[in-house]
Amino acid sequence: MKPVLYFLSVLLIALSSSCKKTQSNVLVVHLMSEPEDMHPTNGASAVRAEINLYTNLSLLRVNYKTGELLPCLVKALPVVSLDGLNYNYELKNNMTWDDGTPITARDILFTAKASKCLYTNNPGFKPYWENILDIEEDPNDIRKFTVIMKRPYILNTWFWTDFPILQEAFYDKSKTLSKYKNAQLTDSVFLQTKPDVKKWADEFNSSKYSTDPQFMNGGGPYKITKWDKGVSITLEKKKDHWSGNCKNDWYCQANPDKIILKLNSNNASALLELKNGLIDVSTVIDYASFSELSKDENFKKNYLLKLADTYNYTYVAMNMKPDGQKHKKLFTDPDVRKAMAMLTPYEQINKTLYENHNKRVIGPISPNKPDFNTALSPIAFDVEAAKDILDEAGWTDTDNDNIRDKMVDGEKVKMEFNINFIKGSKVWEDLGKQLSESMGKAGIYAMLNPLDYNGFFGAATGHDFDMIIGAWQSSAPPEDFSQLWHSSSWTNHGLNFTGFGTPQSDALIDSINTCINEPKRIELSKRFQQLVYDEQPYIFMFTQTRRVIVSKKWDNLEIYTEYPGVLLNTLKLKD
């Protein structure tokens, strides 16, 4: 019996070891907020963009080490015509969708049509697709195609890095869009006579493609297999995926068998989970918790901690074009907006919320980018000077109730309003409290208004707000100001929340976008930053510092300025 018992013991140990190894190749990642949805074209959250890096593929990707463009689905960067309008691409061989069918030029054409279609609910991203005139397939090769642009543009190649390529057979089984040209799908008059396009769009925009994993389809090496709302999102490595043959490229790697994105918006709770080893990666823990962990020698034996620069910045946006009814005309005057900026206690906020790790931003571009306008001076915190500006603008306390007021369009309007922010973010709540307290010293009554993500985003794009706290994620490529600052992005309920923009500023944005000469483009960019600085549609706050915490049981870690800072799919479990 002893040999049998010994054999069973060895077998049990081996099985236990095998199970433990398999189970341990699961990467648990801390999320502060979950995406609003995972729709392939609609949605704007940073978390959604990060997940798309692993579940979807694009024509091109960013080389995170060099900041240069990297071919992804295509064999090489495009061959560009002399006039800068025709971009010739060829897809790589042996690439397939999850059903085994090849990825072809037809899928590229469908992606563009689905994104450009007027009925597709992606107003914030429409400006990026607007410059595509057409895409022509090579009649002799399903992998070759030509992208025809309307005009030369600084991001004619770069913009492909942001958008997943969609499988036509999955999202348009009836091939509805294939019957129409790109120009027809953006013609509102033409579309009125085509109910089939509206029918397709209604289904495409539906929630099933946003939240149900069985309707999430992409070309990447991972798939979302479970989304437990408010708890976690699980990504699992696909079996026998074609990308296994290109492991030298970061976008093909799938080292963890499973990535669990675990939601915990409570910093104290997340801190405890990190200390107990229940989280492998966090880049979003608050600064106070990061500082506490940095001083914990026992914790540092098991985790690496590092602060890293980003291209992101926080802001407080003001409604420059309110309806005058639900939202009063409080911030239509640039002097008043400047006074709001002067009432912001920047140093206090940086010290109490960010442990003095963040840097001031002055305008709509990160100081880590080459075209940052260093000639602009940060607006200083000065309550008394702000009071003087408000007095001169006609905002005084006429009824001695400690709240400023003014006659606007024949109506007495009080300087009182809501500050919207996404609930669950303790940092933004505290930021709002400090803003409100400081503004109160100048006779302004600002109330905190926490909203869930969908409520916050809907109010912002619907111009249904007074003031909002937010953050923008940027990247290394040249800045296209259209999405956030062109007036068309306000009229179509895009991401120009404030209503900033004039024909002159729109023309300047267009000039920047078509300027291929880099020194000239930088000069134009600085002019635009000056224009925004003069108008102060935002209270520009800080460029954010990423707090990177990674368990030392994971190897192959590299940290980048480019979002998301850490590529989860490239981390390897140590032997």
Image (spheres, rainbow, N blue to C red):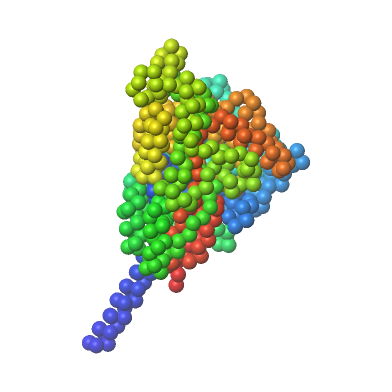
| Residue 29 in sight | no
- Residue furthest to the bottom in view is 2
| Residue 483 in sight | yes
* Placement of 405 over or under 89, stated as above or below: above
Of 473 and 522, nearer the camera is 522
* Residue at the image position 57 percent from the left and 44 percent from the top: 366
* Placement of 87 over or under 66, stated as above or below: above
Of 374 and 172, nearer the camera is 374
* Residue at the image position 40 percent from the left and 63 percent from the top: 295
Of 544 and 381, nearer the camera is 381
* Placement of 47 over or under 195, stated as above or below: below
For residue 273, which quarter of the picture? bottom left
Locate the N terminus and report the quarter of the image it occupies: bottom left
- Residue furthest to the right in view is 82
In the image, is 515 to the left or to the right of 273?
right
* Placement of 292 over or under 124, stated as above or below: below
Q: Where is residue 133 in the image (x, y as percent from the top left)?
A: 65, 33
Q: Position of residue 425 (x, y in %)?
A: 37, 44
Locate the C terminus and report the quarter of the image it occupies: bottom left
* Residue at the image position 58 percent from the left and 59 percent from the top: 249
Q: Position of residue 222 (x, y in %)?
A: 46, 54
In the image, is 355 to the left or to the right of 175?
left
Q: Where is residue 553 in the image (x, y as percent from the top left)?
A: 42, 67
For residue 522, which quarter of the picture? top right
In the image, is 90 to the left or to the right of 281?
right
